[in-house]
Image: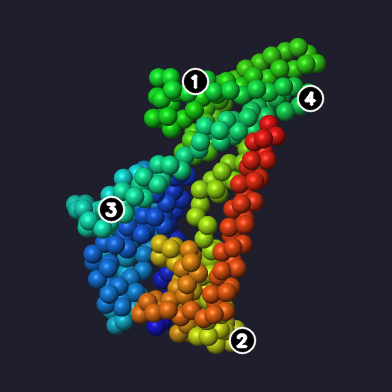
């Protein structure tokens, strides 16, 4: 099987930037729904290697074009679709969009949407982020001042319930200087679905290295513990048909969300030829398969490497959790 990596790279250029919201479907989650569309399933059963090219539209819409990449009709468009990241609804793309999918796809969409809603920051995480952000207020980080950040609404009250529906939490921040006996206050709003903090006095987000670091960690805790593309390539190298094609002047190509939970990996060479060594590595399990036949290409060494890398990924997740706890407990 030969794949046109130029076409794949061009498809990546079509994809832009999306909204950084925790409580909507990720690109790969939406992609998993596209892979269950009956026409796409049929294409896979025909060993046509349907390949997904994602793109970000306005609002909560994601756009997908699905093409065949195997067989005599390689490159043919199977269909163009949109997925609503908030509801999981799938429609055909165009002037007259029509719903697509079946019961299996609808059930998975409901499951993924429910999981996404639970990814927002907890109350304690929001308070920790607000405390960190308060130190980014001009003049609040210097000296021996005491900074207190407390929820503006008590849990269970109507105002707290209203905030929860809006996906925000308000905090009262107070800065007390022991040297000048001056006390000042600010109202801060934490967006639970975006892990960011707004200073309500200025209307601007509070930014600092510490805020960015903590926000990135909180977002990272919500990502699946999967292999990276580079780690998947390490697994693929333990497959004979991949390793055999890495002669002088050849490299492995990977990267791009062409499949919902797999990395597409293949060898390309300076002479312009693409070697017949394309494989799919499951980012969740590390298993290796043939993109066309879906038959396993696993070897004992590939499985060993995958287990070790996934174990390392889990350790990184544990370290990340401990790092967040350390920051929040120290406040």
**Location of mark 4 (residue):** 143
Say which quadrant the C terminus sits in. top right
Viewer-nearest of discs 2 and 1: 1
Residue at the far right: name it: 179
Task: Give how far across and how far down residue 155 sits, in percent.
Answer: 47, 23
Q: Disc 2 versus disc 1: distance between alpha carbons?
A: 66 Å
Determine the image quadrant of residue 40.
Answer: bottom left
Task: Give me the residue at 55% from left, 70% from top.
Answer: 306
Task: Give me the residue at 78% from left, 23% from top.
Answer: 144
**Location of mark 1 (residue):** 154
Task: Give me the residue at 39% from left, 79% from top.
Answer: 295
User: Disc 4 or 2, which lies upstream in sequence?
Assistant: 4
Query: Would you say the residues marked 1 and 3 are in contact, meaning their CB atoms lie under 8 Å apart?
Result: no
- Secondary element under disc 1, as helix, strand or loop, is loop
**Location of mark 3 (residue):** 107
Task: Give how far across and how far down residue 233 sits, in percent.
Answer: 55, 72
Residue 248 tag number? 2
User: Disc 1 or 3, which lies upstream in sequence?
Assistant: 3
Viewer-nearest of discs 3 and 4: 3
Task: Give how far across and how far down residue 147 sits, in percent.
Answer: 68, 23
Asked if residue 94 shows in the view, the reply is no
Residue 35 as seen in the image, left or right of residue 289: left
User: Disc 2 or 1, which lies upstream in sequence?
Assistant: 1
- Secondary element under disc 4, as helix, strand or loop, is loop
Label 1 Cα crowd, 10 Å radius (few <14 / some 14-19 / many 20+): few
């Amino acid at each position: 099987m030969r794949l046109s990596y130029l076409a794949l790279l061009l498809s990546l250029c079509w994809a832009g930037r999306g909204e950084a919201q925790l409580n909507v479907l990720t690109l790969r989650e939406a992609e998993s729904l596209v892979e269950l569309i009956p026409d796409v399933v049929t294409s896979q059963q025909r060993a046509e290697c349907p390949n997904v090219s994602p793109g970000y539209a306005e609002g909560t819409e994601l756009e997908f074009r699905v093409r065949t990449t195997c067989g005599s009709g390689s490159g043919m468009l199977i269909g163009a679709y949109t997925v609503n990241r908030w509801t999981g609804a799938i429609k055909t793309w165009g002037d007259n969009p029509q719903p697509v999918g079946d019961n299996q796809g609808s059930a998975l969409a409901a499951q993924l949407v429910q999981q996404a809603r639970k990814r927002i920051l907890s109350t304690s995480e929001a308070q920790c982020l607000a405390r960190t952000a308060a130190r980014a207020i001009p003049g609040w980080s210097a000296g021996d001042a005491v900074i207190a950040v407390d929820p503006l609404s008590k849990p269970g009250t109507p105002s707290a319930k209203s905030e929860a529906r809006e996906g925000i939490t308000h905090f009262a921040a107070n800065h007390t200087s022991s040297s000048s006996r001056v006390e000042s206050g600010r109202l801060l709003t934490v967006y639970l679905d975006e892990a960011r903090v707004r200073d309500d006095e200025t209307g601007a987000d509070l930014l600092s290295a510490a805020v960015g670091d903590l926000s990135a960690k909180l977002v990272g805790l919500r990502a699946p513990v999967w292999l990276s593309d580079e780690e998947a390539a390490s697994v693929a190298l333990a497959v004979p048909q991949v390793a055999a094609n890495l002669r002088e002047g050849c490299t492995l190509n990977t990267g791009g969300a062409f499949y919902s939970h797999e990395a597409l990996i293949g060898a390309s060479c300076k002479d312009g030829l693409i070697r017949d060594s394309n494989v799919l590595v499951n980012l969740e399990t590390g298993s290796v398969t043939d993109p066309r036949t879906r038959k396993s290409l696993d070897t004992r060494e590939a499985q060993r490497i995958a287990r070790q890398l996934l174990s390392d990924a889990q350790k990184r997740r544990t370290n990340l959790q401990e790092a967040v706890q350390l920051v929040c407990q120290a406040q």
